[in-house]
Image (cartoon, rainbow, N blue to C red):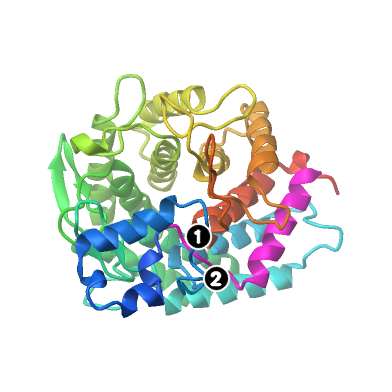
Amino acid sequence: MEITDSFNRLREYCEAEDFKGWDPYDGLNSKLFQALPLLPKSALCRLAVIQGMKRCPLNLRRPLLVPKQHNPKGLALFLQGYCNLYNVETYGRASLQENTTTKAELLRKINHLAELLLSLRSKGDYHGACWGYNFDWQARRLFLFPAYTPTVVATSFAATALIDAYEITQNRQYLDTALSSAQFVLQDLHRTPHNRGFLFSYSPLPGNDTVFNASLLGSRLLSYCYRYTNDSQQLEAARMSVRACCDSQKPDGSWVYGMLPVQSWVDSFHTGYNLDALAAYQENTNDLTFQQNIDKGFTYYIKNFFMPDGTPRYYNDKTYPIDIHCPGQLFITLARLHKYGEQQPLADSVMNWTLKHMQDEKGYFYYQIKPHFSSHIPYMRWSNAFMFCALSYYLLNKPLAISR
């Protein structure tokens, strides 16, 4: 079927690029910008460069000498995707192409990506393994994240992918590295008291402590580690963060992005992140306290962010810009919540819409669709690694969608 061809074209594109690429936020990697004596020292200029290049529908990165690089979160998404593909083949659910990729070839990809991920750990005085992004990033609140500053988001994706890689390869280094990341969450992140618990910060830097999905990703990671360690400290910290975030859920099942007034929007894929993290916490800890929050959140998610024809929506109150994360996260969320059976028509309609409107004939996926000027730039982490992972979940959980 079309999904098989779509996935193989994406895989061929990403493998040909060796999983390197550009990113929506990598403007400060421009060698021309770095050569200017004053502009890199100005927070406002740094912000203008990042936002300007992110919003421009034309790709200025090649003339501005922005190199294609490996991004740790992107590598983690690819690693998770290849682990899913290995399990597709293991369970005999589907052939991914006419000349089926062998399990040995998939195993080589898993080890290659895991080793790359290990090599890109953030260096510094941190208590456990952690990861950041391969570019300086200027936040709108005018503080700077230097390249490879570790974040709970990148670390959560990297560590959980390494755990899955360990379960396939039995390479103890992958597991030990991943389990050490719990100490990064417990000791290096700030905790902001909120409701009956606290929120983990986005990074060890000050001033980024108010985002619900980031805190829940910290809980998600701790729950994965708890499954192996049975460490009560990890369980309690994860529970306190989950409790604070669930206490902040609106009566209709929605979450705003964060606690600050400027973070009061409700969007699609961060809602999906929240549901994924809550379900992972529940599965890994057997704590069913928050099932009602998951149920309410999921009902809100599918009713507000997807149109009858499969068109995904970015916000609860408007459709555009349609970001590739909006459809992609659905396939991951359905897998985590074991909802493919009951939501098959939704999954299929969103998949058909996405392949028709957001995949290029060369195999890569577009960043965003807008009413007038869309961005078709092939971002490796944001678009292609994310959709590679999302499609692998679809293949793993919807075997009847694929013909042998």
The spot of residue 30 in percent (x, y) is: 40, 72
Residue count near mark 2 (Cα–Cα under 10 Å), binned few <14, some 14–19, many ≥20: some
Q: Which residue is mark 2?
A: 20
Quarter residue 256 falls in? top left
The spot of residue 96 in percent (x, y) is: 77, 55
Q: Is residue 230 magenta?
A: no
Element assignment for label 1: helix
What's drawn in magenta, residue-wise? 1-24
160 in relation to 211, above or below: below
Give the Cα separation between the discs numbered 2 and 1: 9 Å
* Lateral position of residue 146 relative to residue 111, left or right: left
Residue 204 can be seen, yes or no = no
Q: Nearer the viewer, residue 116 or 136?
A: 136
Residue count near mark 1 (Cα–Cα under 10 Å), binned few <14, some 14–19, many ≥20: many
Total number of numbered labels? 2
* Lateral position of residue 186 relative to residue 169, left or right: left
Q: Nearer the viewer, residue 49 or 80?
A: 49
Q: Is residue 13 magenta?
A: yes
Which residue is located at x 70 percent, y 40 percent? 356
Which residue is located at x 71 percent, y 58 percent? 362
Q: Which residue is mark 1?
A: 381
Element assignment for label 2: loop
Q: Residue furthest left?
A: 193
Q: Nearer the viewer, residue 200 or 23?
A: 23
The spot of residue 194 in percent (x, y) is: 15, 39
Residue 50 can be seen, yes or no = yes
Who comes first in sequence, dot 2 or dot 1? 2
93 in relation to 264, above or below: below
Amino acid type assigned to the residue bearing label 1 in the image: Arg
Q: Nearer the viewer, residue 341 or 140?
A: 140
* Numbered mark located on residue 188 in the image: none
